């Protein structure tokens, strides 16, 4: 089955700096790669996603890049703000058959220091 | 759009007791997923429903676990004879055709087995 590795496990940046989180996946059939933000005591919130036919996607201060050949994808957050502090999860889905279940990485705790 | 809701938010039970959680998906979302999240880990797939049909169960879902979605709307997850290892956050997500991969999560039910 799919295996998703995520790093770093913790990341501390100063407000205004950029943050980058990287993930690798194992199943070449995976074609959908979402990123979720999870705040303490809350469920994961979908913040951005990318399909395998796209190399990069941006939404304001966040962007995701995908390299299907190398099987890795990354989340980039620019101009970080204290409210960006949370745990971020990458995930992958093959969409094979009809399941579309998500396989998640272990998460990155991002701390943005004012 | 009221989002995915889950009830209760927190449940403390003694080992050996039965517990039941409820999930109400986003209105008209015909697909519903259950995931389990333990401390420091990403969510792990348990099972999913297409309308009222349960189409796949993870090997994580032992015989003590049962899930239903009787009318294709809300779903329940029951754990019988709870064990301390069942302590986790139980997350529900829903999605809508054709974007089944785009899953929206509820706030979760945190189960503590003492």
Image: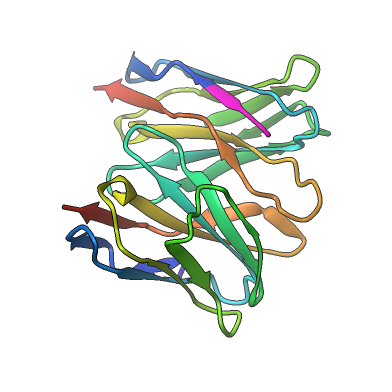
Where is residue A58 drawn, in percent x and y?
Answer: 64, 32
In the depicted structure, whether residue B62 falls above or below residue A8: below
Residue at 28% in and 63% down: B9
Which of the pair A16/A69 is nearer the observer? A69
Q: Is residue A42 visible?
A: no
Quadrant including the C terminus of chain A: top left
Q: Which residue is found at the position 23% from the left and 62% from the top? A: B11
**Magenta-colored span:** A1-5
Residue visible at 53% across and 70% down in the picture? B26
Q: Is residue B29 left or right of residue B13?
A: right
Residue B41 place in picture, x, y as percent: 40, 34
- Magenta stretch containing residue B93, yes or no? no
Side of A110 where A75 appears, left or right: right
Q: Give whichever of A67, B54 is nearer the camera.
A: B54
**Above or below — where is B79 with respect to A106?**
below
| Residue B31 visible here | yes
**Residue A93 drawn at (x, y percent):** 68, 41
Q: Quadrant of residue B17?
A: bottom left
Quadrant containing the N terminus of chain A is top right
């Amino acid at each position: 089955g799919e295996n998703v590795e995520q790093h770093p496990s913790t990341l501390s940046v100063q407000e205004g700096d950029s943050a980058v989180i990287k993930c690798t996946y194992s199943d070449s059939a995976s074609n959908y790669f979402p990123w979720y933000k999870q705040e303490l005591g809350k469920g994961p919130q979908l913040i951005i996603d990318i399909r395998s036919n796209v190399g990069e996607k941006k939404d304001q201060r966040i962007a995701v890049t995908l390299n299907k050949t190398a099987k890795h994808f990354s989340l980039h957050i620019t101009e970080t703000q204290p409210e960006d502090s949370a745990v971020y999860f990458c995930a992958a889905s093959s969409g094979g058959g009809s399941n579309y279940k998500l396989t998640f990485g272990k998460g990155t705790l991002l701390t943005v220091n004012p | 759009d009221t989002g995915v809701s889950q009830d209760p938010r927190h449940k403390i039970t003694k080992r050996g007791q039965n517990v039941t959680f409820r999930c109400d998906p986003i209105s008209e979302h015909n697909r519903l997923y259950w995931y389990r999240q333990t401390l420091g880990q990403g969510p792990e797939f348990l099972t999913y429903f297409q309308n009222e049909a349960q189409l796949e169960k993870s090997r994580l879902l032992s015989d003590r676990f049962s899930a239903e979605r009787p009318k294709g709307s809300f779903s329940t997850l029951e754990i019988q004879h709870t064990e301390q290892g069942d302590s986790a956050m139980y997350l529900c997500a829903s999605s809508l055709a054709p974007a089944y991969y785009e899953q929206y999560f509820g706030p979760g039910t945190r189960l503590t087995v003492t």
